[in-house]
Image: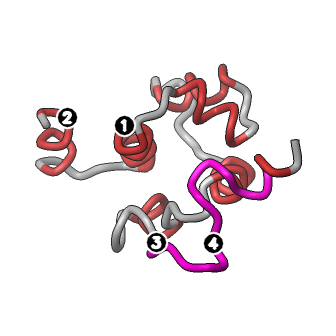
């Protein structure tokens, strides 16, 4: 609850939104990295502020792994964190990247 209060009461950046999604999803950073097929050190550097820019490739991998995570919310903080579930969408963490393994 304190974590949510922290995020709500300050302007969030992309890294904050990724951290919030990980917390909201109840997964570890390692699980997030593995599901997105992003090297763990890359995710760690991003979340710890050593890597300031999120590349288009990182966004693509996150979107493939978590199709119900709103890209508009992730990139710009606009709208809801997650998209409504539909019959054509897959479950979070079960995107096409996860199915190809």
Image marks 2 and 1: residues in contact by CB distance under 8 Å: yes
Image marks 2 and 3: residues in contact by CB distance under 8 Å: no
How far apart marks 4 and 3 lie (CA) works out to 9 Å
Crowding at dot 3, Cα within 10 Å, few <14 / some 14-19 / many 20+, comes out as: some
Q: Nearer the viewer, residue 61 or 96?
A: 96
Highlighted range, magenta:
84-97
Q: Earlier in the sequence, mark 4 or mark 3?
A: 3
Q: Give residue 28's position: percent from left, percent from top.
A: 49, 27
How far apart marks 4 and 1 lie (CA) works out to 22 Å
Does the magenta segment cover residue 85? yes
Does the magenta segment cover residue 61? no
Q: Earlier in the sequence, mark 2 or mark 1?
A: 2
Image marks 4 and 3: residues in contact by CB distance under 8 Å: yes
How far apart marks 1 and 3 lie (CA) works out to 17 Å
User: In this rendering, which labeled residue sits more in front, label 4 or label 1?
Assistant: 4
Report the residue at 59% width, 59% height from top.
Answer: 91
User: Could you say whether the residue bearing mark 4 is in a helix, strand or loop?
Assistant: loop
Q: Nearer the viewer, residue 22 or 99?
A: 99
Q: Earlier in the sequence, mark 2 or mark 3?
A: 2
Q: Where is mark 1, residue-wise?
A: 23
Q: Give residue 99's position: percent from left, percent from top.
A: 81, 51
Query: Does 60 sit above or below residue 34?
Result: below
User: In this rendering, which labeled residue sits more in front, label 4 or label 2?
Assistant: 4
Image marks 1 and 3: residues in contact by CB distance under 8 Å: no
Q: Quadrant of residue 4?
A: top left
Q: Earlier in the sequence, mark 4 or mark 2?
A: 2
Q: Where is mark 2, residue-wise?
A: 3
Query: Does 50 sit above or below residue 80?
Result: above
Q: Earlier in the sequence, mark 1 or mark 3?
A: 1
Q: Nearer the viewer, residue 66 or 51?
A: 66
Q: Earlier in the sequence, mark 4 or mark 1?
A: 1
Q: Where is mark 4, residue-wise?
A: 89
């Amino acid at each position: 609850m304190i974590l949510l209060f922290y995020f709500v009461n300050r302007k969030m950046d992309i890294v904050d939104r990724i951290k919030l999604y990980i917390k909201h999803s109840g997964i570890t950073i390692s699980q997030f990295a593995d599901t997105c097929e992003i090297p763990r050190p890359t995710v760690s550097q991003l979340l710890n502020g050593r890597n300031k820019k999120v590349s288009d490739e990182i966004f693509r991998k996150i979107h493939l792994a978590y199709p119900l995570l709103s890209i508009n919310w992730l990139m710009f903080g606009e709208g809801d964190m997650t998209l409504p579930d539909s019959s054509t969408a897959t479950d979070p963490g079960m995107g096409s990247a996860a199915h190809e393994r």
